[in-house]
Image (cartoon, rainbow, N blue to C red):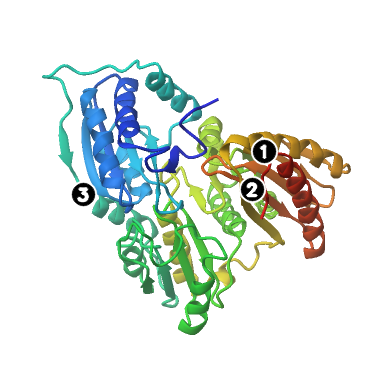
Amino acid sequence: MRRLFGTAGIRGEYGKVVSPEIAYKVGLAMATFIGGKGAVSVGHDVRLTSPLLSSSVASGLMAGGVDVVNVGLVPTPVLAFTAPHLGLDGGVMITASHNPPPDNGIKCFDSMGMEFTEKMEEELEDIIFNEKFAYAKWDGVGNLEYYPEVVDEYVDKLLSKFRPKRIRRKIKVIVDCANGAASNITPLILRKLGASVLSINCHFDGLFPGRTPEPRPDVLEGLGRMVKTAGVDVAFAHDGDADRLSALTSNGKFILNDRLIAYYAKVKLLEKGGGVVIVSIDTSFAIDEVVEKYGGEVVRTKLGKTHEKLVEYGSKAVMSAEPWKLIDPDWGYWVDGIYQAALLTSHMLEKGVTIEELLKDIPEYPQIRVSFKVPNEVKHKIVSEVHEKMREAFKNYESELTIDGLRLNMPDKSWVLVRASGTEPKIRIYAEARTTKKLNEIYEKTLKILKEVAGKYGVKIQ
């Protein structure tokens, strides 16, 4: 079992899970991993501890003989973009994504801009915990170069991909960047595409004063109210590092992320004439319906690891996604929320429609996605017992998936998933059904099981 890396890199509270010492060791381990030569980009988000941790990672890389290209404060997609764009051997991003302000994290990327696989992360951990570091001699340490210009190069390349062939109607957009790393990028790109853009929470602030950086439905209720009064065609919301994107309709309603995934799948399958669509275990059967309609095949995998399946399926895979996150291999092998916003805006401009009109043929089924705080020390034990009881409680289930938690699929196309978070001390319940009544039945039955099992460990589920 891995000791540092979770679902999405290393992430946790600063000073406990993530520290300057850990950051230095990750940098040195990565330098050792790639053979003590070459160059790696380093970037960071807006968190107060991010410049410090970025410097620590850079020091570790240089101590191992690797040159560092410091791109400064950037969204995660831009950091990932630098590796293939500049011909580097990899990249390291300092970010805790959507976690609260006291947290921070470290993500490692390869030369394609793809996040490290589990196997690669395990190799880094082996170097760190067994102190297999390879230090460079005094005359062989890495050089440091600053290259903030990569942001402009990313913007230009994305604009060239999505500049509308014609604008049927100038649409109006609200963009909420959560005071995060895309605050100076996403609004700019959408304006240059031709949209009229209102921006909120678009000044950098590591305390995230505007809202919690996770763009959940409850967090975005204020944005929804603003949408109703502003008369816009869509609202977009990022997390802290802009690998995620949420969208709201022109009447302020949160759009289920699975519907956006299904739309992206439709676009890619029409473009490619079929192929494999890779999605995470917690996704809707609405995606399956759309993918089958357009001649594709759905493959499900672990949360945070869709990129690994993307590589496994090679040219057969047209995209991979999980809620909030999309990877289009024709653009790059990284999750990119800015790319999503540009794609949707470009299509809306070309068709002259609102976001709900763009998605009018994408199914929508009732869903529940909830998380409960549970100490890391017991969350896996609790989840294991819950899984056993779930199989007993839902005796008529048709099939199960155990690649990441336990998902039970029912004959009526409803399903329920319980898994331990890979990034936070939480247990998550996801469920979907064709009716709200059925959804509530599944959820209440699962919640009752979780409460009973957690109680045995002295944990109160609230």
* Residue at the image point whose x is 55% and y is 75% from the top: 252
Check disc 3 and report its element: helix, strand or loop.
Answer: loop
Q: Which residue does the image show at 57% across and 64% down from the upper left? A: 217
The nearer-to-camera label among 1 and 2 is 2
Is 163 rendered above or below residue 402? below
Residue at 56% x, 78% y is: 251
Pointer 1 residue: 405
Could you say whether the residue bearing mark 2 is in a helix, strand or loop? strand
Q: In this orientation, which residue lies closer to the viewer: 92 or 166?
A: 92
Q: Nearer the viewer, mark 1 or mark 3?
A: 1
Query: Would you call the spot at circle 2 few (<14 residues within 10 Å), some (14-19), or many (20 or more)?
Result: some
CA gap, disc 1 and disc 3? 40 Å
Q: Which residue is mark 2?
A: 428
**Quarter of the figure that contains the N terminus:** top right
Q: Nearer the viewer, mark 3 or mark 2?
A: 2
Is residue 394 in view? no
Q: In the figure, residue 433 lies in which quadrant? A: bottom right
Of the pair 124 and 446, the residue shown nearer to us: 446
Q: Secondary structure at mark 1?
A: loop
Do tag 1 and tag 2 residues touch (Cβ < 8 Å)?
Answer: yes
| Image coordinates for residue 338, horizontal then vertical, percent | 40, 56
Three-letter amino acid code at the position of disc 3? Pro
Q: Which residue is mark 3?
A: 148
x and y, in percent, of residue 70 in the image: 22, 41
Callout 3 crowding tier (Cα within 10 Å): few <14, some 14–19, many ≥20: some
Amino acid under disc 1: Gly
Q: Position of residue 453 (x, y in %)?
A: 75, 41
Q: CA distance from mark 1 to mark 2?
A: 9 Å
